[in-house]
Amino acid sequence: MPLSPEPDSPMRCPRCQTALDFAGTKKFHEGTRIGFLGELAELFQNREHFDVYVCGRCGRVELFVDGIGEEFRPH
């Protein structure tokens, strides 16, 4: 049986069971930026977008791939 989304239930920290706060969607990329050529080379780097959730009690951070399973995560 597939899981049904529960948008009203907060996501919980696996460490301390406190509700996680949505901190936004962040871009991460692989590689380094070096001078002008670094800007050009960055166009060809692998980039990922992650939804970031933070526990305000213990500081744990949970990352989720942006665009996958969003119906299970409240924003």
Image: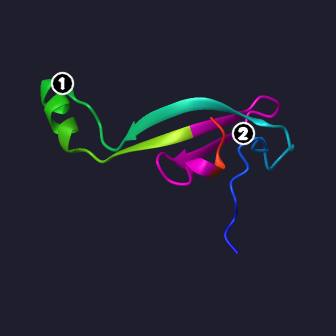
Residue drawn at x 19%, y 38% is 43
Position of residue 11 in the picture relative to residue 64 (left or right): right
| 26 over 15 or under it: above or below | above
Earlier residue among tags 1 and 2 = 1
Q: Quadrant of the N terminus?
A: bottom right
Q: Which residue is mark 2?
A: 60
How far from the left and from the top, in percent, is residue 49? 43, 41
Give the class, few, some or many, for how many residues have Cα within 10 Å of label 2's Cα (few <14, many ≥20). Answer: some
Q: Which mark is residue 35?
A: 1
Residue 47 drawn at (x, y percent): 34, 44
Marks 1/2: CA distance?
34 Å
The C terminus, quarter of image = top right
How many other residues sit within 10 Å of disc 1, few (<14), some (14-19) or many (≥20)?
Answer: few
Q: Determine the image quadrant of residue 61.
A: top right
Say which amino acid is labelled 2.
Arg
Magenta segment: 52-71
Secondary structure type for disc 1:
helix
Which x, y percent locates residue 18?
84, 38
**Amino acid type, label 1:** Gly
Q: Residue at x 19, y 29 (%)?
A: 39
